[in-house]
Amino acid sequence: MNRNPHLLPLLAALLGVGFLSLMDAFMKAAALAAGAYSASVMRSAFGTAMIAPVWLLRGGRWPKMPVLRIHLLRGTVSAFMALSFFYALTKLPIAEAIAISFVAPLIALYLAFVLLGEQIKRKAVIASLLGFAGTLVIIGGRLGRVESDIETLKGLAAILFSATLYAWNFIIIRQQAQVSSPEEATTFHSGVALIVLGLFAPWFFAMPSPGALFDIAMGAALTVCGAMAITWAYARAEAQVLVPIEYSGFLWASLFGWLFFSEMVTPTTLLGTVLIVGGCWIATRSDPVPPMTQPE
């Protein structure tokens, strides 16, 4: 029987990306209403309150210093990654912001080689380049209609900064997943981000309205679910196998954009989607086992 050992991790990663894409829709509404900083702080607060009791009830203990350092690093990187992304969402359409952020998996593929020593397989390179080409088609079809004013340029700068941190976050997740449970990783992911962002609260925080708080609470719940699913996946498969799945985020964004914002799918979006799905299909194929001609 031909089994794909990466199937379950791939499905978990796909589901995790879906959760996080839906979170983006809720958080854009919250960021527009309350500001990107206040929305980010409250999301981390809600997320910590949701996942910390689960971690403690499952016997969670304070991690040792080497593991704690990884938690602190990921939480700090994630805090500014999320803040810059939510700020970009207030300046750019959600689908365009997500499409531009797809440069992160391509960067992460090679960071995994440099930082983790993972061997880059040929099909992983082809898959990532194919997926990246799909995002370029989508960006070319959509950004041509956006006026290049100062606010748009701010959004582009923010999303590119966020994408760089996102690529680094891929590598940290891979390291973190090897030494901690999904509950522990997710607890510290939200908790550390809350502490880091909270340092600036005296100058920038304003309590969101009840409607914005609801959107933030939904975003926090989806963040917890997405983070746990992705952490579980990265503990069971290499980064180069899971990275192309990140491109499915645009498919999720197209769905949620249509459901929540009545965004229509353009021909360039369809073409880009075909390229992205093709890249994911190449990455998830199992390598055939060559027959042995002699006993070894």
Image (cartoon, rainbow, N blue to C red):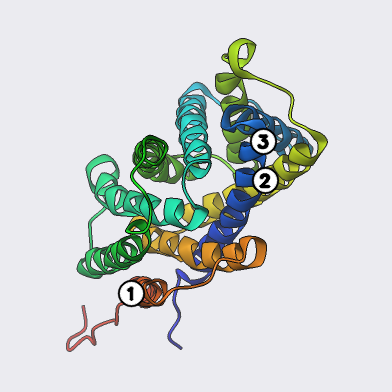
Q: Which of the 4 image quarters holds residue 115? A: top left
The answer, for residue 117, to whether it is visible in the render is no
Q: Residue furthest right?
A: 210
The answer, for residue 242, to whether it is visible in the render is yes
Q: Estimate how packed mark 1 is, as few (under 14), some (14 to 19) or many (20 or more) residues with alpha carbons within 10 Å.
A: many
Do the CB atoms of the residues marked 2 and 3 lie less than 8 Å apart? yes
Task: From the viewer's perspective, tell me whether residue 227 is left or right of residue 267.
Answer: right
Q: x, y percentage for residue 242?
A: 41, 60
Q: x, y percentage for residue 177?
A: 49, 45
Foreground: 29 or 134? Answer: 29
Do the CB atoms of the residues marked 1 and 3 lie less than 8 Å apart? no
Task: From the viewer's perspective, tell me whether residue 147 is left or right of residue 90.
Answer: left
Dot 3 corresponds to which residue?
43
- Give the mark nearer the N terminus: 2 vs 3: 3
In the rendered image, the quadrant that contains the C terminus is bottom left
- Give the mark nearer the N terminus: 1 vs 3: 3
Total count of labels: 3
Residue 275: mark in rendering: 1
Dot 2 corresponds to which residue?
219
Task: From the viewer's perspective, tell me whether residue 266 is left or right of residue 207.
Answer: left
Q: Estimate how packed mark 2 is, as few (under 14), some (14 to 19) or many (20 or more) residues with alpha carbons within 10 Å.
A: many
Residue at 50% from the left image edge and 25% from the top image edge: 72
Q: Which of the 4 image quarters holds residue 127? A: bottom left
Q: Give the residue type at disc 3.
A: Arg
Q: Give the residue type at disc 1.
A: Leu
In this view, 61 is above or below 86: above
Q: Estimate how packed mark 3 is, as few (under 14), some (14 to 19) or many (20 or more) residues with alpha carbons within 10 Å.
A: many
Disc 2 element: helix
Q: Give the residue type at disc 2.
A: Gly
Disc 3 element: helix
